[in-house]
Image: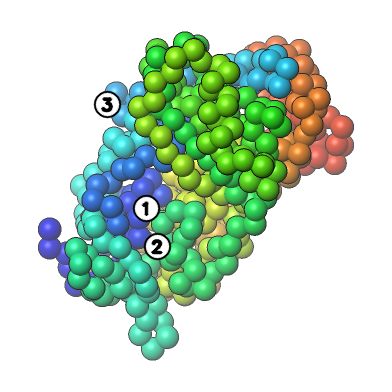
Amino acid sequence: MKIKEFYDIVIVGSGPAGSMAALTAAQDGASVLMMERDKTVGIPVRCAEGISKRGLTRFFEPEEKWISTNIKGAKLYAPNGESCPMISDALGDGYILERRLFDEFIAQQSLLHGADLLTEANVYDLFRKNGTISGVKFNHKGKKKTLNCNLVIGADGPESNIGKLAGLDTKLSLNDVESAAQYRLTNIDYDNDYTHFYFGNEIAPGGYVWVFPKDKNTANVGIGIRQDKADKNAKYYLDKWIDRNYKNPKSLTFITGCVPTAMTPEEITTDNLMLVGDSARQVNPVTGGGLSNILLAANIAGTIAAAAVKRNNFSHKFLKKYYKMWLKEKGKRQKVNYKLKKLFFNFSDIEFNETVKMIQEIPSDKLTLFELFKAAVHKRPSLIKDLIKTYL
């Protein structure tokens, strides 16, 4: 496909963050190009593929082809084996996606609304004119090229080369990143009505094991750990857990990666540039789950980007409206969730056991996020006050 010589907006990355920002900006009349370094949108899939119903239906009506499983709830497991279900309207219910197809769907919607897509395009630098970011430099099928634009949006994942090139602070400390590994296992026996979360310092130091259903006998089984708390890598702990819990599992796929569990930095914009998604640290710091947050953030980013085009104002001052809108939507929760993360993943196994026992005593129809977190922080009055302000 032939692309134009100039676009209002160039988006680096065509995952959900990039595609959602492209869709929103294109709907508002901006000319948009997404640049994807891989050959195909949605591949490889580095995700457990879960999303809440509320987070998805805020933007899209579910389509059968990219919904793998309907989930009616979640179960939490303490180190001692005790568990508690979460099945209230406020918790647990959602979908397991076919992320490859879902990512393709959002990208397709952006194209149908006027955006363009260039695959096998690896952006390696920003192009500057008189010191101002004015485009990108990229490799495309062995050739180095430059493309002009007014605004660059970095949707290029946790490492965010775009953020670094723009001089934004995208560094992650060891306690703000999870080392992750995941198999897609088949030939396993489990309750596929729920997502499952297993906690414990021997099981997953500084994190947890998850089991996300794909069908009756198949699931995404993964782990996230804090490498500074572990003496082995994520695969070691995951293999150990799988060996203890399944008789004869068969692996279909295996992936590794990192998940940022940091606060969103104060600066995710600069003149002529924005960051969105994992590059802007917009996942939930407690769970490391990010798809609902990322769709929301990308929608805001696309809206502000299109407004910048209409006003011909790409200054940091104007683009910072995106960050302010993000804070209004998620800022308080991000801040409290970050505190909760630091608390949860420093729990002893005894504290995990106590927390699950307290949650077991709450009627399932009364179990809200507030009640869940209150049980976890019952010995920390200051955090309970934060929870009241945030969740009530």
Residue 260: which disc?
none
In terms of sequence position, does the residue under pointer 1 or pointer 3 come before the other?
Answer: 1
- Which residue is drawn at the image coordinates 48% and 58% (left, top)? 159
Q: Position of residue 87 (x, y in %)?
A: 58, 16
Q: Nearer the viewer, residue 127 or 248?
A: 248
Quarter of the picture holding the N terminus: bottom left
Count residues near mark 1 (Cα–Cα under 10 Å), then give few for <14, some for 14-19, many for 20+: many
Residue 18: which disc?
1
Give the residue at mark 3. Answer: 65
Q: Nearer the viewer, residue 208 or 14?
A: 208
In terms of sequence position, does the residue under pointer 2 or pointer 1 come before the other?
Answer: 1
Are the residues tagged 2 and 1 within 8 Å (C-beta)? Answer: yes
Q: Amino acid at mark 2?
A: Ile
Callout 3: SS: helix
Are the residues tagged 1 and 3 within 8 Å (C-beta)? Answer: no
- Which residue is drawn at the image coordinates 87% and 32% (left, top)? 379
Residue 153: which disc?
2
| Residue 295, picture quadrant | top left
Q: CA distance from mark 1 to mark 3?
A: 21 Å
Q: Indicate left or right for 357 with 26 as reference.
A: right
Count residues near mark 3 (Cα–Cα under 10 Å), then give few for <14, some for 14-19, many for 20+: few
User: Is residue 362 something that shows in the picture?
Assistant: no
| Residue 301, picture quadrant | bottom left
Q: Position of residue 119 (x, y in %)?
A: 23, 55
- Which residue is drawn at the image coordinates 66% and 24% (left, top)? 368
Q: Amino acid at mark 1?
A: Gly
Quarter of the picture holding the C terminus: top right
Count residues near mark 2 (Cα–Cα under 10 Å), then give few for <14, some for 14-19, many for 20+: many
Callout 2: SS: strand
